Amino acid sequence: MNFLDFKKRMFDLACFNIYQIYAIEPNFNRNNLTRWINKGYLLRLRRGLFTFPEYKAKPQYVYYFANRIYSPSYVSLHSALSFYGMIPEAVVQITSVTSLKTAYYKNDFGEYSYKSLKKELMFGYELKSVSDTCSMQFAMPEKALLDLLYLYPFYNSESEFENLRLDEAYLHDDLKKDLIMEYSSKFESKVLDKRIKLLFKVYDL
């Protein structure tokens, strides 16, 4: 199989592993992957996971790849808050939560960090369509905020909440306070409950 044939058959997958290649071409020579990477025809997302450089021009795939690089996971924390416009800063790392151990990866698309969360707390995310064939797991705004308060213990004072600079218009007009309370009860964390009360006080919710 030459590269053009390979690309025609694999491109719409966005990213793929060797087993997906073998499913299409059982006699595939995996040495081709190293040769095509060296020529710039392919990019390595992590060991055993590959994509095409054309996807660098499709920014939404940065989040989709986060799901595929380390699974199970969903995009949350600072990346999700920035995506929804809840914090003003552009986020350097793509941040996700996972039921596996904490992890970090770096590739041509950026830096990917994964915070560990108990399996029973892996909820509050939805599928967002990236293309006709790809969708990504992405935290709802309320869950992204709760994940942040739960996993980052330094958000425990009024000054820290002020420094987070949450968008007050979004908090008052779009954030579902009832959903915050419903989700927070599932954490069964008094510390988290205390941080939520402080958040509501600082932003007058």
Image: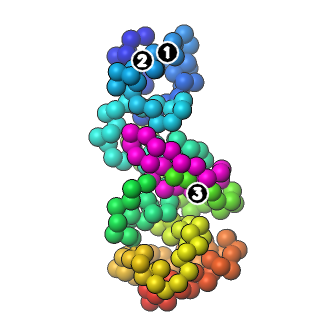
Do the CB atoms of the residues marked 2 and 1 lie less than 8 Å apart?
yes
Give the CA distance from mark 3 to mark 1: 34 Å
Looking at the image, which is closer to me, 169 or 110? 110
Do the CB atoms of the residues marked 3 and 2 lie less than 8 Å apart?
no
Residue at 46 percent of width and 87 percent of height: 202
Q: Is residue 117 above or below residue 131?
A: below
Q: How many numbered circles are shown? A: 3
Q: Is residue 91 visible?
A: yes
Do the CB atoms of the residues marked 3 and 1 lie less than 8 Å apart?
no
Looking at the image, which is closer to me, 133 or 190? 190
Q: Secondary structure at mark 1?
A: helix
Residue 31 placement (x, y as % from top left): 49, 15
Residue type, mark 1 in image: Asn
Residue 46 placement (x, y as % from top left): 51, 36
Q: Which residue is mark 1?
A: 31
Residue 123 placement (x, y as % from top left): 60, 60
Residue 44 placement (x, y as % from top left): 45, 32
Residue at 42 percent of width and 17 percent of height: 35
Residue 115: which disc?
3
Any magenta on residue 148? no
Chain-order first, disc 3 or disc 2: 2
Q: Is residue 200 visible?
A: no
Residue at 49 percent of width and 89 percent of height: 201
Q: Residues within 10 Å of mark 1 (few under 14, many from 20)?
A: few
Q: Provide the residue span drawn in magenta.
A: 94-112
Q: Which residue is mark 2?
A: 35
Any magenta on residue 109? yes
Residue at 65 percent of width and 79 percent of height: 191
If the image is split into quadrants, where does the N terminus sit? top left
